[in-house]
Image (spheres, helix red, strand yellow):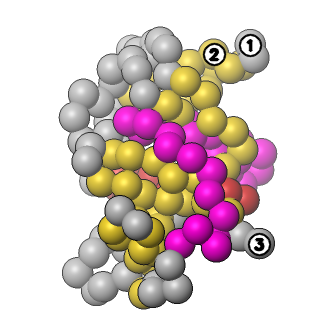
Amino acid sequence: MRGYVTFRLGERCFATPLDEVREVVRLRELEALPGMQAPLAGVIVLRGVPLPVLDVRPEGAGRAGGDVIVLERAGGEAVGVAVDAVLAVRGEHEFAEARSAAPANLPSYVVEVLQDATGPVLLVNLERLLELTAAA
């Protein structure tokens, strides 16, 4: 069974595959470092280790509050992605059968459109989102 971590950015609900997420932590304090450039918002200390956090929230980038989705990147490097809120871990069966490929006019990080009782949930590849955000 596939699972998803669902989260909110602004008013929109998103999902990312559970197997791409190492863990989720509350964003209590974000420490800015000299010379940082967007989308790098700062670092948090996670079990004694500094973790870079990229902020993809539409408003209030760099602010405390919200959640951090921790991704394990190639080579064992970890990076955090700040979101407004992590909502739940949900199984594939919790989404309606009416799934569709992402329309061509959506950004390339949107992989698929899932449906639940509240409406469309965009399945995203967070790694691809970070690459596009860093290139901008």
| Residue 124 visible in the displayed image | yes
Q: Which residue is mark 3?
A: 1
Give yes or no for residue 40 being in the magenta stretch.
Answer: no
Residue 136 x, y percent position in the rendering: 28, 53
**Label 1 environment density (alpha carbons within 10 Å; few <14, some 14–19, many ≥20):** few
**What distance separates the C-alpha of mark 3 from that of mark 2?**
33 Å
Residue 45 marker: 2
Q: Are marks 3 and 1 in contact (CB under 8 Å)?
A: no
Residue 133 marker: none
Quadrant hosting residue 17: bottom right
11 or 78: nearer the viewer: 11
Image quadrant where one finds the N terminus: bottom right
Residue 22 x, y percent position in the rendering: 72, 44
Sequence-wise, which precedes: disc 3 or disc 1?
A: 3
Residue sitting at x 45%, y 74%:
114
Range of residues picked out in magenta = 69-95
Can you tell which of label 3 and label 1 is closer to the viewer? 3
94 or 62: nearer the viewer: 94
Q: Is residue 106 left or right of residue 34?
A: left
Examine the rendered structure and indicate whether residue 12 appears above or below residue 59. Answer: below
Residue sitting at x 77%, y 45%:
76
Residue sitting at x 22%, y 34%:
59
Sequence-wise, which precedes: disc 3 or disc 2?
A: 3
Q: Which residue is mark 1?
A: 48
**Label 3 environment density (alpha carbons within 10 Å; few <14, some 14–19, many ≥20):** few
**What distance separates the C-alpha of mark 2 from that of mark 1?**
6 Å
